[in-house]
Amino acid sequence: MLTITCSILYYYYEIRKESFLYFGTMETIIKEILEENECLTADGFDDAIIGFQQKDGNVIVVYSINKCIYTLMENDNMGYEEAEEFLHFNTINCYMGVKTPIFVKTYFNG
């Protein structure tokens, strides 16, 4: 969590060119970045945001595929395979222009 926090804070600094020390919750920082840069988001997957990517002057949201699948399993009572198929068909494979969110598979040691 510390790595993500530092990355987002640093990225926030790079976007705003303001003080590096910003005090606020992760949710506040993420919300401000999304609003200020008019980022496209995937509905219902706010908890799966793991960062941001800057490409060609656009800020793009990066999601964890694993967290998105878990969200579908928890909120929509889907099994793993059903949630994975639903996510790929209805979200990941949709192109919405240059600000289309990025989805990456994440692995954690536990």
Image (spheres, helix red, strand yellow):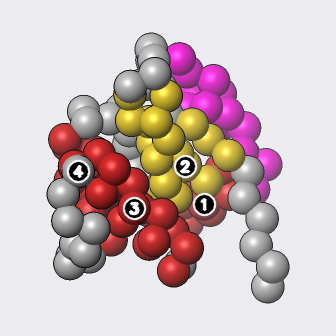
**Placement of 100 over or under 3, stated as above or below:** above
Q: Position of residue 53 (x, y in %)?
A: 50, 41
Q: Can residue 69 be seen at all in this image of the molecule?
A: no
Answer yes or no: do the residues labelled 2 and 1 have beta carbons within 8 Å?
yes
Among the two numbered marks 1 and 3 on one chain, the one whose residue lies closer to the N terminus: 3
Q: Position of residue 85 (x, y in %)?
A: 72, 38
Could you say which disc has been placed on residue 10 in the image? 3
The range drawn in magenta is: 79-95
Could you say which disc has been placed on residue 67 in the image? 1
Answer yes or no: do the residues labelled 1 and 4 have beta carbons within 8 Å?
no
Say which of marks 1 and 3 sits in front: 3
The residue at which mark 4 appears reads as 17
Q: Nearer the viewer, residue 70 or 57?
A: 57
Judged from the image, the secondary structure of the residue bearing numbered disc 2 is strand
Judged from the image, the secondary structure of the residue bearing numbered disc 1 is helix
Q: Mark 2 and mark 3: span between their CA atoms?
A: 18 Å
